Amino acid sequence: MSITQWLIFILVIQIIHGLGTWKLYIKAGRQAWEAFVPVYNSVILMKIIKRPWWWTILLFVPIVNLIMLPVVWVETARSFGKNEFLDTFLAVITLGFYNYYLNYVADVQYVENRDIHPKSSSGDWTSSILFAIVAATIVHTYFIQPFTIPSSSLEKSLLVGDFLFVSKFHYGARVPMTTVAMPMVHDTIPGLNVKSYLFNDNYEERNTSWKNKLQLPYMRLPGFENIERNDIVVFNQPADTLLNMNIFTPDRNYYKPIDKKTNLVKRCVGIPGDSLEVRNGYVYINGKLNELPDRAKLQFAYDITLKGNVNNYARLMEILKTYDITDNPYQVEEGIFVIQATEEAANKAKNHPNIASITRRIAPKGENGNLFPRVAQYPWNYDNFGPIYIPKKGETVELTMEVLPLYKRLIGEYERNTIVTRGNQIIINDKPATSYTFKQDYYWMMGDNRNNSVDARAWGYVPFDHVVGKPVFIWMSWDGLKNPRWERWFTTVGGSGNPVSYLIPFLILLAAWFGFNAWRKKKKAN
């Protein structure tokens, strides 16, 4: 729904609320009209049910309000003496319409001095857990989100098994677009393998289904910095119609809402307004080689030929790990494997007695790798790609049949226009077009592991409305459950030089805090 439609929807909800509670407001010593005034009625209701005024804010926060509304329905019933389990059940199961029964049928009286504290330990636990979930949901949605590195596309900068904190506020927190969803989970409910949100994923019904009418339009809170070239960024994969994110076989009949698309983490090598080209695996921006931060370690694919007694896969991995080559190799023919390694590691590994040769694999320019935009006139591959222009908000590009494949998805899907061709003519929103002005910024996201990363070369530009946040901190890291990487615990994602672990200082501060609390309690007891 648009903002206007949402405002109308909220106004209708306010009228429904007023019709179902105005007599209850009177019994609580208020005026009937106060039940109908948007927002103000919620503030007054908080006074009636003896709850803090800031609960009103939580009623209008997407996702959080799904938790708060049932609480308010139950608290309203209890404020008029309805404390039994059946009352609580009816308040929740009727989606608050139990208030109509209390308002028009039941003979209820307002309980002026109601005790709002839980009357049992189970009630106390329920209240604590409920508001812990509310607080965690707010933090998760608008401030910091935990994230786990699932693939080796940013090896050696970020490793598989790194656990990150991703800042939502650096680039500005995105207000959830999907309004009905389970808090603090992404697209799937763990253990049940069912989607966690209310939305019709059928592509043909995306604009007509009533479920999809509940979507909020894209909105983002102000951030304090822009995405800079070479930032590591978490974002929703634009082309996420995949069952397996490592196998790029989209099903265009499957359509997720933006904020429920698969979360990915890549390096932003191209920002709005850049001209980008990949030459033999290296990125060139506006004709110049892109200079990466010193922590970034590019990896490329190499053919490795073995000799001597390397009789099993485990022995091969043992050899490779001595040179910090950790991606799993795969065999292409007898005695020859493909590995992913930095140039430095490959040069060192050449000297091992069981390695006959290591040769970099480079797809030549003009060899079609079936990559974005997947048309014959752009025979690009992972090593040689482009040049392309990265669109900038407010910038206008000329549209021809030749460049249209680069921008058609952006204009049609990401910026929600209708775009078709008739012969050599381009039609946008039923009007002939020879140019187009972009409505938002776009970015080019790639992995440092250049030949083992499903990234923008496969699916193209990333719109700013798909950006989730900026990874800022590694709080834990494991190479399998039995192998913690202690040196990576409590390290920063950005910065120069080798990462420094702040785990020991954190543990010292934590021990000092517990010691101080114990001393304070002992002093009070005496």
Image (cartoon, rainbow, N blue to C red):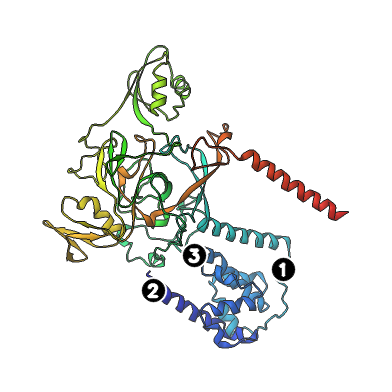
- Label 2 element class: helix
Q: Nearer the viewer, residue 383 or 26?
A: 383
Q: Nearer the viewer, residue 90 or 525?
A: 525
The residue singled out by tag 3 in the image is: 62
The residue singled out by tag 1 in the image is: 117
Q: Furthest residue to the top?
A: 308
Quadrant of the frame with the N terminus: bottom left
Q: Residue at x 29, y 50 (%)?
A: 390
C-alpha distance separating marks 3 and 1:
27 Å
Along the horizontal axis of the image, is 523 left or right of 427? Answer: right
The residue singled out by tag 2 in the image is: 5
Question: Is 25 above or below relative to 293?
Answer: below
Q: Nearer the viewer, residue 284 or 513?
A: 284
Q: Residue at x 62, y 83 (%)?
A: 106
Can the viewer see residue 385 in this picture? yes
Question: Is 213 above or below relative to 354?
Answer: below
Q: Amino acid at mark 3?
A: Pro
The image shows residue 397 at horizontal and vertical percentages of 22, 56
Q: Nearer the viewer, residue 271 or 49?
A: 271
C-alpha distance separating marks 3 and 2:
16 Å
